[in-house]
Image (spheres, rainbow, N blue to C red):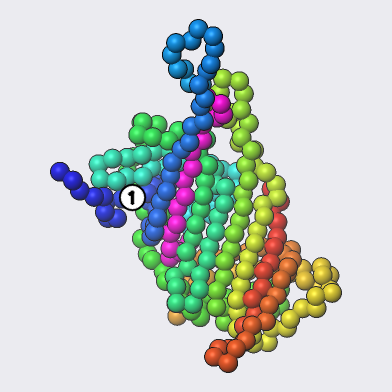
Amino acid sequence: MLSRVRRENQKLAVNGTGINAVQSISFGYETSASPINSLGLEQIIYAPTSPQTASISVESLLVHDDFFLQFTGELPFSGQVDYRSQTTKFTEAYLSSYSSSCSVGEIPTLGMQAEIYGELGTGNFFDFGATTPHDTELKIAGYNSISINLDEFNTNRVLSYSLDIQTPRTPVYAFNDKSPSEVVSDSPLDVTMQFSIELDDYKIKNMRFIPEETVFKDVSLIINENNSTSNIQTFSFSDMILVSEQYSADNNSNVQINFTMKGAILR
């Protein structure tokens, strides 16, 4: 009998914790192999030409403190995707990128991509036992509950934001190893933040004063629950440089400033 797997029949758990508000999941693997050619060979034999790798990506709503942010460091994670009576498991996943974004009228979203250097499949690699939800209380941010702090300047007149953190890794392989003996975290991590805000008392910087007056020592993106001081998530960075500013205005909207900042995290 033909049927389909609906959203309510799918669940994601990471390190024994159920992840809520997931919007999409994608995972898969690639195998590189080439046929071996030789004189007198009457059959085709394939041999791997590079290590086997897999990947997973997840998008979710930011409705409580994010579970994946902790994995921008050294730690790997394992998990499983349940759909109906089937379970696919993965081990030794390392985050390769992390992102968050939001615009007026939307719920903030999160995205992560990870490289899997362990196993991926339906084998019995581990048993979490019963999974527990990360947070059952969902908190929704409002248009005026997202604020930005740039040293002494702060505003909650945020029209949109996007955050991207790249977390590069280098796997180290030895002869005859199917999995890397070590996964080295490269340094630094590249951070890019983009904001659009309504012009209030913000002052545009002088383009000739780079970098003396365009490095912000303390940068914070604060996301609170709507009509509340209850914090959902705070992203904090130091020593970020302003790389672009754009003034935008027309006869149908308020003046807004679009700017991009870049930074690095040493580890």
Mark 1, residues whose alpha carbon is within 10 Å: few (<14), some, or many (≥20)? some
- Residue beneath the point at 24% across and 50% down: 4
Quadrant showing the N terminus: top left
Q: Position of residue 169 (x, y in %)?
A: 62, 42
Q: Which residue is mark 1?
A: 11
Magenta-drawn segment: 48-65
* Left or right side of 236 for 152: right
How far from the left and from the top, in percent, is residue 252? Answer: 54, 91
Residue at point 66%, 73% (across, down)? 259
The reply to whether the magenta stretch includes residue 206 is no
Front one among 66 and 255 = 255
Which one is nearer the viewer's eye here, 43 or 176? 43
Left or right: 22 as drawn, with respect to 193? left
Determine whether 114 is above or below 101 in the image: above
> Who's the residue at 40% across and 31% down the image?
125
Farthest top residue? 40
62 shown above or below 184: below
Name the spot of residue 111 as percent of width and height, x first. Answer: 49, 57
Q: Secondary structure at mark 1?
A: strand
Name the side, left or right, on which 255 lies relative to 144: right
Residue 186, picture quadrant:
top right
Q: Relative to 6, is 121 above or below?
A: above
Which residue lies at the image location 62% right of the left edge and 52% below the top edge?
A: 166
The x, y position of residue 240, in whole percent, is: 72, 64
Res. 228 in view: no
Q: Is residue 68 visible?
A: yes
How many numbered discs sit on the rendered protein? 1
Three-letter residue code for mark 1: Lys
